[in-house]
Amino acid sequence: MKVQLIKRSQPSNWLALTSPLLALALTMVAGAIMFALLGKNPATGLYTYFIQPLLDPWSRDQILVKATPLILIAIGLAICFRSGNWNIGAEGQYLIGGMVGATIPVLFNTWDSPMVLPLMLVMGIAGGALYGAIPGFLKAKFNTNEILTSLMLVYVAQQFVDWLVRGPWRDPDGFGFPGTKSFNESAVLPALFSTWDAHYGAVLAVIAAIIAWFVLSKTLKGFEVSVLGQSERAGRFAGFRPAAMTIFAFCVSGGLAGLAGIAEVSGSVEKLDDKLSLGYGFSAIIVAFLGRLNPLGIIAAGIVLALTYIGGEAAQISMGLSDRAARVFQGLLLFFVLACDTLIHYRIQVTAGSASAARAARAEGAG
Amino acid sequence: MPGNKQSDETTGACQSVTQATDPLLGAPLLSPQVPLVEAIGITKLFGELKANDSVDLTVQQGEIHALLGENGAGKSTLVKILFGSLQPTSGSLRWLGQPLNVASPSEARKTGIGMVFQHFSLFDALTVADNIALGFDSDVSLSEVAQTARQVSVDYGLPLDPSAVVGDLSVGERQRIEIVRCLMQNPQLVILDEPTSVLTPQEADRLFEVLFRLRDEGRSVLYISHRLEEVRRLCTAATIMRHGKVVDVCDPRDSSPVELAARMVGGDIADVTRAERDQSGPIILEAQNLSAEAATPFSVRLSKINLHVHAGEVVAIAGISGNGQGELFAALSGEAGVTGAITCDTLRIADKDVAPLDISQRRKLGAAFVPEERLGHATVPQMELSENVLLSRHASDKDTLTSAAPIRRKFTSELSAIAKRVCDAMDVRKGTADPVAASLSGGNLQKYVVGRELDRAPKLLIVNQPTWGVDAGAAAQIRQDLINLAEAGAAVLVISQDLDEIFQIATKIAVMSDGQLSQAEPAKAMTRERIGLLMSGSDDADGTNGARAA
């Protein structure tokens, strides 16, 4: 028996829609196997991970809190990836965005004005965009590998923010804990409802998704993104400039990561501390692909991935599973998403008998 | 079984009828009665596609046998099966009457089958001897290889310096390395895939002498080509393939090229006609002293290109590919950018200085461009034909397509209408109403790509390799369309490797060689020999250098 991948003459539209669901199902199967190997009941495990958080109001609130930065970052990554630029450093742009936005409440702690919050958000976007522009510019100008440069800048950002909150920006009344003073009222992104943790960042994420969807699918700029992502030469032929697109994509992606950062700082933590880097920038890569690089799909994908975080915490408490299990789930999900995407362009053909068996049969017939 | 008995007999015959010995390599030459190689009922499936459908091929000993067919007819598949790089789905091979099983190219070489590929597999940074030695067992010393290579090259009149670095050699010389490497294995069957596509006419003549020599030694040659004149000169037998099947086996000398072409294509090909008048209008494209630095180590430097194309003219640029044609196309279209790497005294389209303008702005002046590569350059492979309209026309057709706002929804219906108009006008055959570009066959996609620009009624059309890899029917249609465009008053610049095509459509011909362009001369005054000389860079200095063309 021989299993072959045969290229389809036209990509399958049906599979393009269902492949994320297929990937999700396969992740569940693999997860069940993992639970069994760990000596846990697979049914309980999957229930704790994927169903229970949805039934509990507190967990639903937390899912929204985690989904917000994931969705914002993933939208930017989707634009970047579609244009053929591989920004792996969203985590760093998220940190710098949070840090730059936080300069206002940190340096002007007593400034109380309705201008504060919008200014913080704009500065967060600008900070992330400028930090994202560094690998973009290096690629456009010197043809450096943006995967490496953007990734390495994450570590720079982590160390820099860590130094700030332990050093010059540390709250003198904070008992020596790393972190700034808590922001005053006007610098806090309000919660959606008075008892919730989820804040208006979730609304910003949905608005960003709708705008990004519109730009990508309905405008000439979106066409330019797809053309340059699929074929740089065809893009040059069309009169589009690949170098300009690289910088544009990195700025947009960095800006959205920066917005996610400042929304997290201002809406969730309400100060800048050493625990801002939670890996959202990396998990958002999974969200972007699970959402098929479509901003609307990314909203759903962000919620699914947030679910694995919250479910992971629940499983840690009630089943005694390591929090690494949640990471394994995310890894499995990305693996299956990419694997299932193959089926959009290829179909599987199973033929009985290998080529050598067929030759042997022929030789027998001749002899 | 009868098959068994026959092979026993032939084996016996082989041993007893050894008549002659190759003077150089000591190989026994065999009786000419038994076919050297036979393919019987070869079928090869690629998914659902039948690349070969019960193909039979018989090559006699001491014969130059042509394998004719259009692109996609299944020639390459058949040859790869003979050479062991593909395994047939069904069917069998025979070698001197005995069943033959070639599982890999190295087994094929051991059997006595050698192949010279269209695309060379040589390392530029190594010497000729190094490259040849790579194909041999490691226990043969480099000096031995060099010695044998020198001897073979002298014996066959293929001058080659084993110590030369491949990167410094011309395409013709590189092909010689491949041929020498192949001959050193002492093959009984030499397969050549489109060998003259990279040669000047003079180099091709030299190659033919080598092939005749091989034939006289009793070896066989399987010669793959679509150049019918060549095949009639060289070959005494031809197998013609179409759509994966053998449609005819004949002696090509008994048929005219037109008859052979008709059999290849499976129908008559429309003749390309040109009105015999020499009316040319104002200069539309003008380049003076256009130079461009090589952008990468693999590209060619353009030096002091002078070129004028008048309205109503078809100016053709002949030349072997890789002599700067792609770079010239990029410089003229504006794709190369407007950076300091390109310098010129004058670069004008329709009386406007276009040196600082990009490709979109040049298009707005009425220029249209068709690059060589259909997929990934002229089109985005996974985008629909309608979206691909936008690719080259979003700027030039701004008024109708992108209107006031850059909102794509507004023009999707317009794009579909244009795509449909182009497909109808060019007779593009497709499976669905608006397929992705990659799903079209080469000929159909080329018709679409040319039609997309013709639909704009451009003042200037620059085409690189308009019919490369296109079936004869589509090629004739495209050529006629280019002529018609010029007769309607546009200026047409065609960059092509195909001399037949150039003589069919051009009013003036210039030749490109190593980044330099000869002066354009009237097509009627040009001969293949003169083009060949210019291709090899040896302008015979007829005193016209420096004079302005037309």
Image (tube, coloured by chain):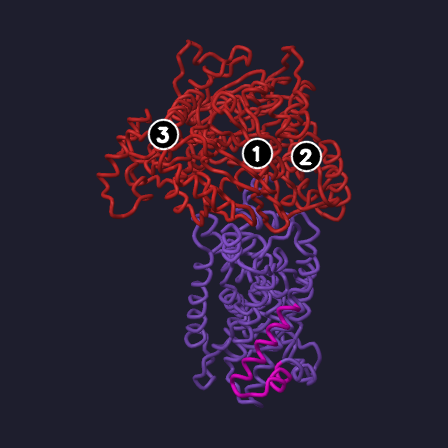
Chain colours: A purple, B red
| Residue at mark 3: chain | B
Residue B452 marker? 2
The chain containing the residue under callout 1 comes to: B
Horizontal arrangement in the rendering, residue A238 relative to residue B160 (left or right): right
Q: Which residue is at the front of the view, B472 or B10?
A: B10
Please, what is the dominant secondary structure of the magenta stretch?
A: helix
Name the amino acid type tagged 3. Answer: Glu
Q: Which residue is mark 1?
A: B469
Mark 2 neighbour density, 10 Å: few (under 14) some (14–19) many (20 or more): many
N-terminal label among 2 and 3:
3
Same chain shared by disc 1 and disc 2: yes
Q: Magenta segment: does it hold B37?
A: no
Question: Percent position (x, y) of residue B202?
Answer: 42, 20
Kindly tell me whether residue B340 is visible in this rendering: no
Which of the two labelled residues, at mark 3 and mark 1, occupies the earlier sequence position?
A: 3
- The answer to whether residue A324 of the structure is visible from this angle is yes
- Distance from disc 3 to disc 1, alpha carbons, whole Å, reads 24 Å
- Spatial distance from mark 1 to mark 2, Cα to Cα? 19 Å
Near mark 3 (Cα within 10 A), the count class, few <14, some 14-19 or many ≥20, is some
Extent of the magenta region: A21-49
Q: Which residue is mark 3?
A: B173
